[in-house]
Image (spheres, rainbow, N blue to C red):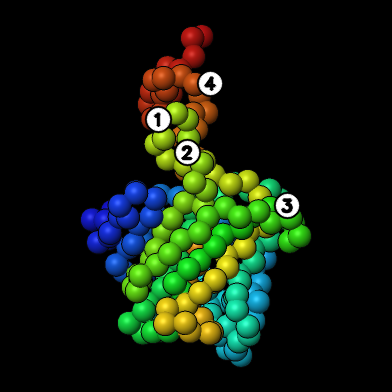
Amino acid sequence: MGPPPPSITSTDGTATMYQTRAPPPLPWPDIGPMAKWSVSSFKFGFGPECLQDGDPDTFWHSDGPQPHFITLEFPRKVAIQKLSIYLCFPSDDSYTPATIAVRAGTGPLDLQDCRVVSLEKPDGWFTFDVSMEPVGEDGEGFKPVHAYVLQVIIVANHMNGKDTHVRGLRVLGPIEPARNDDNDDPFPFVTPRFKMYECIR
C-alpha cells in the first residue's frame, strides 16, 4: 500500500478534500453498488451511471430546475457513514455545486435532513460524515445513519449556476470491527502447523 493521497482536512475535522482525480483508497466500504440510483434529471449520455464509473472525465449533467438531487434506494436498511463526492471547479466553473444537503429515511416521502455542507471551489474528492451526531461523550467520530433511502441534494452552484456537474459519488458504510472466528481467543492459532495443536486429544 503506497503513501496516502494529498489531502486537506476542514478546520472542524468533519471533512477531507483529497486532491486526486482517481478515487482515493479509503478504509470505509463502498455500499453504493447495493442501491438503485436515480437522479432528478440528466442530459442524454450524462446520466447517473457517470457517477459510479470511476472515470474523472465523465460526469452527471442535470437538465432541469433546481434543486437537483441524486437518490439511492437500498433493498434493506443499511448503515451509512460517509459520502465521497468528486467535484472539479477548474473544469466545471458555474456547474460546480456550492451547497450540498443530505437526507435519509425509510422511504422517499419521509426523508429527514442529516447534513448540509458548503464548498469553496472544490477540486478533488470531498469526503464527509453524513451525520453530525458524535459517538459517545468524547466526541471522537460520528454515528452512522441507518436508512433505506439516501438523497444528495445540490442546493446551489458556484456563481449562481443552474445545471450541475458531479463527476463521482461513493456512499461509504462504517468500518466493521475485525471478526475473530476462533471463539474470541486472544491468541488464535492461524497457521496450519500451529492449528495441529489447537485441541487437546
The answer to which of marks 3 and 1 sits earlier in the sequence is 3
Residue identifier under label 2: 134
Q: Amino acid at mark 2?
A: Pro
Mark closer to the observer (3, 1): 1
Gap in angstroms between the C-alphas marked 2 and 1:
8 Å
Whole-percent x and y of residue 28? 45, 50
Q: Residue furthest front?
A: 160
Whole-percent x and y of residue 145? 58, 47
Gap in angstroms between the C-alphas marked 3 and 2:
22 Å
- Callout 2 secondary element: loop
The answer to which of marks 4 and 3 sits earlier in the sequence is 3
Q: Amino acid at mark 1?
A: Asp
Q: Amino acid at mark 4?
A: Asn
The residue sitting at 42% across, 78% down in the picture is 158
Mark closer to the observer (2, 4): 2
Residue identifier under label 3: 106
Residue identifier under label 4: 183
Q: Quadrant of residue 5?
A: bottom left
Q: Nearer the viewer, residue 52 or 66?
A: 66
The residue sitting at 57% across, 83% down in the picture is 62
Mark closer to the observer (3, 2): 2
Whole-percent x and y of residue 132? 49, 46
Gap in angstroms between the C-alphas marked 1 and 4:
30 Å
Mark closer to the observer (4, 3): 3
Gap in angstroms between the C-alphas marked 4 and 3:
35 Å
The answer to which of marks 1 and 4 sits earlier in the sequence is 1
Residue identifier under label 1: 138
Q: Residue furthest top?
A: 201
Mark 3 neighbour density, 10 Å: few (under 14) some (14–19) many (20 or more):
some
Labels 2 & 4 near each other (Cβ < 8 A): no
The answer to which of marks 2 and 4 sits earlier in the sequence is 2
Labels 2 & 1 near each other (Cβ < 8 A): yes
